[in-house]
Image (cartoon, helix red, strand yellow):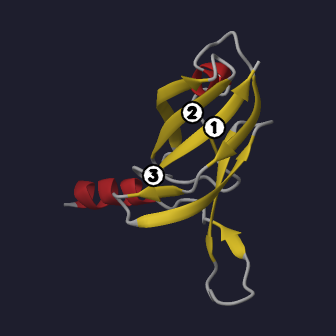
Amino acid sequence: MARLALALLVLAAAPALAATWTCDERTEVLGKTLVLARCVAHGTYTAGGDAVGSATAAGVDLCNSANRIPTASVATAAASATTGQGYLVTYDRATHTVVLLTAGDTPGKGNALVELLGGTSIEGATLMILTTCK
């Protein structure tokens, strides 16, 4: 019984895994200059944002090629059927991270959006990123 209690304590204290965004569907538009990527999140949100795909291969994830470099990107809002939540999204091209925004504790007229709390599950959240590539 003591082992079970210790195991549960260890599991409860273990940090949640950071989210990973996998862009498994990419469509090239206007030749290879413009690419629309569908990305899905798995895990929990990290304060400050989570990387899209591999930080070393952003061209593959967003431009459909390791030989192309993302030059500008626009992301749609994200929604998760798993958690039932929706988020506004900002994409930082320099760090290839997705930052999720939501209503604060006291939503209402004149209240700004706030960043989603780190550790919040975003499992299954889906967004689209339109990227120009060179």
Task: Give the alpha-carbon distance from disc 1 to disc 3, as whole Å.
Answer: 17 Å
Most extreme residue toward the top is: 67
- For label 3, the residue is 125
Binning the other alpha carbons within 10 Å of mark 3 as few (below 14), some (14 to 19) or many (20 upward) gives many
Rendered image: mark on residue 130: 1
Task: Give the alpha-carbon distance from disc 2 to disc 1, as whole Å.
Answer: 5 Å
Q: Amino acid at mark 2?
A: Leu
Image coordinates for residue 107, horizontal then vertical, percent: 62, 86
User: Are the residues tagged 2 and 1 within 8 Å (C-beta)?
Assistant: yes
Image coordinates for residue 77, horizontal then vertical, percent: 57, 56
Q: Residue at x 31, y 58 (%)?
A: 8
Residue nearest the viewer, comparing 93 with 56: 93
Ranked by sequence position, the earlier of labels 1 and 3 is 3
Q: Is residue 112 left or right of residue 32?
A: right
* SS assignment at label 2: strand
- For label 2, the residue is 36
Q: Residue at x 59, y 25 (%)?
A: 29
Task: Give the alpha-carbon distance from disc 2 to disc 3, as whole Å.
Answer: 17 Å
Residue nearest the viewer, comparing 16 with 7: 16
* SS assignment at label 3: loop
Ranked by sequence position, the earlier of labels 2 and 1 is 2
Rendered image: mark on residue 118: none
Binning the other alpha carbons within 10 Å of mark 1 as few (below 14), some (14 to 19) or many (20 upward) gives many
